[in-house]
Image (cartoon, rainbow, N blue to C red):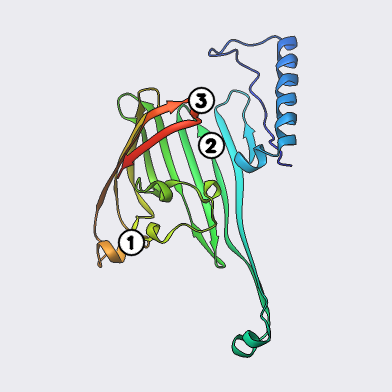
């Protein structure tokens, strides 16, 4: 089961910085501990949120998480195939391992730092700072992250059906340094994102052989149909 450890916020009443009395703090702490225990039995927080540390005044929140993609294959031949391909073989490997540190500090400022282990090599993954709730603009993100292009590419592997993305994703930009603005409208049923990036990833050779190119990437998606609490929907978009 996953475990979610957090110093829960008990120093402020809902929405305002009003101190709670001791009895209210104890009641709230007990309520939160029961919720955490129930969630841990479901095995959800450790998978979705990692380990969480939160200061009493909620000025700093840190989440530490990890993701491992383990692949194993075993091949058994009959006598005829063995003469061609050799004896039975099996192999295992960690295709991808990620450890990430994410959270928020000050007010409406989030951070994300990630290390990836790919085929034994340690690489920097998604790393950025972003400021939320900017009037009209929404969220402004600066750092290295996936460009807003292709639903399959911007969706984490842990939320996809297969371990590998399709071959079509090879034509989509990957993680590149840049700046991006994004916002939602119509009760989160309309979303847009636009950014400027410097290609340094796998698409560099396709876009600019000298590595001096600049990309402008945009994406717009919408939910014209959303019914039955999301059980029925129509999602459309373009980038």
The Cα–Cα distance between marks 2 and 3, rounded to whole angstroms, is 28 Å
Q: Residue 174 occupies which quadrant of the picture?
A: bottom left
Mark number, residue 103: 2
Residue placed at 74% from the left, 25% from the top? 33
Q: Which residue is mark 3?
A: 229
Judge depth for marks 2 and 3 and give the one in front: 3
- Badge 3 element: helix
The Cα–Cα distance between marks 3 and 1, rounded to whole angstroms, is 38 Å
Compared with 156, 61 (above or below) is above
Compared with 168, 235 (above or below) is above
Q: How many marks?
A: 3
Mark number, residue 80: none
Residue placed at 71% from the left, 29% from the top? 36
Q: Residue 89 occupies which quadrant of the picture?
A: bottom right
- Badge 1 element: loop
Q: Which residue is mark 1?
A: 203
> Among all residues in the image, which is located at the extreme bottom?
83
Q: Residue 52 occupies which quadrant of the picture?
A: top right
User: Where's residue 191, x and y in %?
Assistant: 35, 33
User: Where's residue 186, x and y in %?
Assistant: 35, 23
Residue placed at 70% from the left, 23% from the top? 32
User: Badge 1 local density, few (<14 within 10 Å), some, or many (20+)?
Assistant: some
Q: Nearer the viewer, residue 183 or 190?
A: 190
In the picture, the quarter occupied by the C terminus is top left
Q: Nearer the viewer, residue 227 or 151?
A: 227
The Cα–Cα distance between marks 1 and 2, rounded to whole angstroms, is 29 Å
Q: Nearer the viewer, residue 35 or 51?
A: 35
Residue placed at 57% from the left, 33% from the top? 61
User: Where's residue 1, x and y in %?
Assistant: 74, 42
- Badge 2 element: strand
Q: Earlier in the sequence, mark 2 or mark 3?
A: 2
């Amino acid at each position: 089961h996953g475990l979610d450890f957090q110093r829960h916020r008990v120093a402020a009443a809902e929405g305002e910085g009003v101190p709670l009395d001791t009895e209210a703090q104890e009641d709230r702490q007990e309520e939160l501990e029961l919720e955490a225990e129930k969630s841990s039995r479901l095995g959800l927080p450790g998978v979705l949120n990692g380990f969480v540390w939160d200061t009493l005044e909620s000025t700093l929140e840190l989440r530490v998480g990890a993701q491992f993609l383990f692949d194993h294959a075993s091949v058994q031949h009959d006598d005829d195939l063995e003469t061609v391909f050799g004896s039975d073989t099996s192999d295992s490997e960690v295709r991808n391992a990620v450890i990430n540190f994410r959270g928020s500090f000050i007010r409406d400022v989030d951070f994300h730092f990630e290390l990836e282990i790919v085929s034994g090599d340690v690489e920097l993954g998604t790393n950025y700072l972003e400021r939320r709730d900017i009037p009209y603009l929404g969220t402004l993100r600066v750092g290295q992250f996936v460009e807003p292009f292709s639903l399959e590419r911007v969706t984490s592997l842990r939320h996809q059906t297969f371990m590998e993305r399709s071959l079509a994703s090879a034509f989509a930009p990957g993680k590149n340094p840049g700046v991006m603005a994004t916002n939602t409208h119509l009760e989160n049923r309309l979303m847009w994102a636009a950014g400027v990036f410097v290609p340094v990833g796998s698409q560099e050779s396709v876009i600019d052989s000298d590595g001096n190119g600049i990309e402008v990437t945009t994406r717009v998606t919408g939910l014209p149909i959303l019914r039955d609490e999301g059980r029925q929907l129509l999602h459309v978009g373009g980038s």
